[in-house]
Image: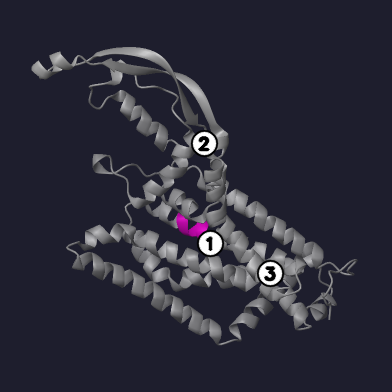
Amino acid sequence: MNFTNVRVITVLELRQRVRSSRWKFTALALFVLVSAIVFGSLYVTTASNGSYEDWSPVLLTTVLFIVLFVGLIGAPALSGASINGDRRDATLAVVQATPISGWELALGKLLGAWLASLTFIVVSLPYLIWGIATAPNSVHSSILAIVVLAVALGCYCAMGLGFSSITSRPTGSTMLTIATVFFFLLGLPAIFGLAMPSVQRSHEVLTAHEEWDWNEAAHDPDYRPVCTDRMETRNFHHTENTWWLLAPNPLLMIFDAQSVGSSRGPGGDYGIVLDGARIVSEVRSGPVIEGYPCNKMYRSYTEDDSYYERRGDQYVGHSWYWGLLATGLVGGLGFVTAARRLQVPVATMSRGMRIA
């Protein structure tokens, strides 16, 4: 692969976007949006008897979410018309007539779209730095969350490139890319919910049964009923078999990346970041197949409770890379598809597709 050719295509892609003045207004609009949300949320917090200390821990997460949602639309728009748009404008064939391979052309277009999408992060960089400084989690986990977001945007650009190579209309490829991205965001969690009955299993567990003597209970304030343990059949959901459906969700990936090396706060509380990361961790851990026998009644916090908490936390910060890998595989499929469709000479073409 000739990386000089890749660099030339990347520069051409970036210049094509910079040539238009609309990107400047888009970047300015994004900065204004982020600023309005950041300072608006700060004002609402302080106006409702809150403090800066209450607001600052969620600043980084707020900015990351804004950039993510803008990127979910922007990344497909940047790459969804990269190939069929050039075909429509009769400029792609001119490039293909030069000594450049389909792989080099596809990689250059992907890098151009990805670098353009990173503008969303660059525009928000002042607030991201502010958020890193005030975040309750470590600096390296905060930076990791930003890197995960940047890589995810690149994967979404690769998906758009693939759809752009197999459809003739830029609008169609852009909409297909957005639909795929939102399938990761909303579709997979919906499938996870629909799959819950399929992972339900019955297990026999020891369960407490109380027998009350109401007359004695009425006269003795310290009365406790007679408790006996019996085996009962109960249903448990083995979500450890379907947890991977939640892993590619971009929101949960960012939550989990931010939670690397974090632990619960004072009093057993979780922040919003750890709450989000713990969703995947608890689902991945699966159910605790255990009943509620008599020896667990009428007691306070014990080591058993601590075990349940540790079990629920065991995968916190250890699932984001699986989600990023799944997203990367789909993005890689899009890139390979685009590279193969850009090879010349073209053996077959879809109906309505033009070369020049």
- First in sequence: mark 1 vs mark 3: 1
* Residue with the mark numbered 1: 150
Residue 91 lies left or right of residue 196; in this view the side is: right
**Mark 1 touches mark 3? (CB < 8 Å):** no
The residue sitting at 72% across, 78% down in the picture is 85
Place of residue 316 in the rendered image (x, y in percent of width and height, measured from the top left): 43, 42
Amino acid found under the numbered disc labelled 2: Thr
* Residue with the mark numbered 2: 239
Amino acid found under the numbered disc labelled 1: Ala
The residue sitting at 50% across, 37% down in the picture is 284
Residue 82 higher or lower than 137, as above or below: below
Label for residue 331? none
Amino acid found under the numbered disc labelled 3: Ser
Query: Is 146 a magenta residue?
Result: yes
Residue 341 lies left or right of residue 319; in this view the side is: right
- First in sequence: mark 3 vs mark 2: 3
Location of residue 80 (image quadrant): bottom right
Label for residue 173? 3
The Cα atoms of the two marked residues, 3 and 2, are separated by 34 Å
Instruction: Give the residues in magenta.
Output: 145-149
Residue 82 higher or lower than 198, as above or below: below
What crowding class fits label 2: few (fewer than 14 Cα within 10 Å), some (14-19), or many (20 or more)?
many
Quadrant including the C terminus? bottom right
**Mark 2 touches mark 1? (CB < 8 Å):** no
